Image (cartoon, rainbow, N blue to C red):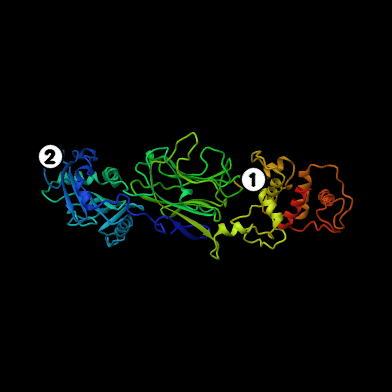
Amino acid sequence: MKILKWVLVLVVVSLSAAGVPRAEAVVDVTSNELQAAADIILPNADSLGTLKGYSAFHFEKKTSMIGGLSARYKAQFLADPWLDSELPEIQLLMYTYSSQDAAESAFMGLIGLNDFSNGEKTVLSTDSHALYYQSNFGGSGVDLFGTIDAEYRSLHLVEWNGNVVFQASLFRGNGEYNETNLQTFADAIAKTDSVEPILADALDNTKLAMGLLFPPSQSFWSSQSESSSLNLSDSFAIPTHGTVHLNVYVTDPSAAVGTILDSSGLSTPSDGDLYLYINSAGTLFAGIYAPNFDADCTQEAGWYRLETSSALYPYEWNAIDLHYGVGGFSVSLNGMEEASCSVSQPRSVNDLYLGDFPGDSIDESMIGTVDEVAMEYSLTELGEEWDAVLAEHLFLDLPDTDADVPIFQYLKAKGVFLGSDGMLYPDDTLNRAQMVKVVLRAFNRNGDVGTLVPFWDVPIDAWYRKYIAKAYKEEIVTGHDDGTFLPGHEINRAEFLTMLYRLDGSKRLSYEGEYSDVSEDDWYALGAAYAAAHGLYPGAELVPGEVVTRREAAHVLYALMNE
């Protein structure tokens, strides 16, 4: 299941079957097809690695089996070329399954066999697609499939790809005893990490040939050139808050480089434009344009970008989920969330394309195949679509009957209060960092001036550092004598009004005792004078120590912005 930091309920709308944990088999190859193409699929003996003390491997035989195919290669002992038994052999074994899911299940079942707990075999390394193990004893049926009789311990690499499970094995068969041969073989396989590449190369060559022979026979869309393009918006109702699902098949990732999804191309982006891109290493880059949002990840020129740590597996379907809007921005690969960011920018209304964005100056579609495209709408805890809720309500926690809806609607349009995950929290207090951002945005004073600040409690990677840097440079904030800014502390009216007075730049005000609880000697007296001059807090008392909520700040800023 997909791992998300923010719990979402999702509904699927798809042209094909709903619910796409994984696609069907990538190559969809049958055992008959495998056996018929054996001469093409099986690697040339010259391409196999060599062991110290032995010749290059030569092809011995191939065997068709129920459900699969096997082949054997043998090397000669250089010290005794006439020796014809107990020589190193490589066996390649491949079994076809009904689907990619079935092959994966078979592979996972092998990892759980008792052979690894009773000491007969030892796992040397493993990941989601490969198992490298050692059979610790000679005998019959020493490999996991019971196909090899070995005189000595042996090494095996099992992998699954598409709907096929592969095994490459290095072993020494039974026969005439030769002590020098035995010791040479033992020395050759003593460093097991030097044998694994030999077995891996043999399997890679086999998978490459199979991938070329048996590409996906059916798909939703296939890109054979960098100019390939398909407008998804013509076929799907794409949510404003939700997830785009698709399964992607590529051969060599270095040849697949390009755009998978794009809604802006090289044109000036709109808020909420998206892209998804595969690079030469097979990892994914995803981006969303959200210049007005702040989040826990880096923004560059208005874009928040993510990169997966895992790469797409070649020659099989890879399930990709791109989530945006309520719940944040994230990209998942084969059921695991790879990268995420808290930015909750909704998707733009621009058309979303598979492959190249048409009409710009560069053709940059990925080369590969896409299938099982599906859209999921994010739902509230009550099961309502966020798209529908936010189309009818400004924020989920701000009822339409709230008298301040017009104020928050105005400020949202100005980029002052955008909310988070569809919520405003209007009566929550603001801290000092949040207020700096709000005030600068309200008066369009949030231009980039770098991130240099003298406050030791403002982290270099804090989302709010750029705002505090701007406010400090313009002498809107000064911090405290101990070198702190206290960004997380709640802000009170005295601090808020002083900030507004300094931002206004007016030096003509003087405090005339307008409030009974503010004296002329108070450090915030000019802030109180500013409030009185603009009619922000009518009444006899200012209550300068009162903490400021979003609602209160909205009233003050709305009044000033509409003077």
**Residue identifier under label 2:** 80
Which residue is rendered at x = 36% and y = 52% of the image? 127
The local crowd at label 2, few if under 14, some if 14 to 19, many if 20 or more residues have their Cα within 10 Å, is few
Q: Is residue 58 left or right of residue 366?
A: left
Q: Position of residue 454 (x, y in %)?
A: 68, 42
Instruction: Name the residue type under label 1.
Output: Arg
| Residue lying farthest to the top in this orientation | 361
Instruction: Name the residue type under label 2.
Output: Asp
Q: Position of residue 391 (x, y in %)?
A: 60, 56
* Residue 170 visible in the current orientation: no
* Residue 230 visible in the current orientation: yes
Q: Which mark is residue 337?
A: none
Q: Position of residue 308 (x, y in %)?
A: 45, 47
Mark with earlier residue (2, 1): 2
Q: Is residue 516 left or right of residue 225?
A: right
Identify the image quadrant of residue 136. Answer: bottom left
Under circle 1, the secondary element is helix
Q: Is residue 168 left or right of residue 334?
A: left
| Residue 193 vs residue 328, the one in the foreground | 328
Q: Position of residue 76 (x, y in %)?
A: 15, 41
Which quadrant: the N terminus?
Answer: bottom left
Which residue is rendered at x = 32% and y = 54% of the image? 100
The local crowd at label 1, few if under 14, some if 14 to 19, many if 20 or more residues have their Cα within 10 Å, is many
Which residue is rendered at x = 14% and y = 51% of the image? 174
Q: Which mark is residue 465?
A: 1
Q: CA distance from mark 2 to mark 1?
A: 74 Å
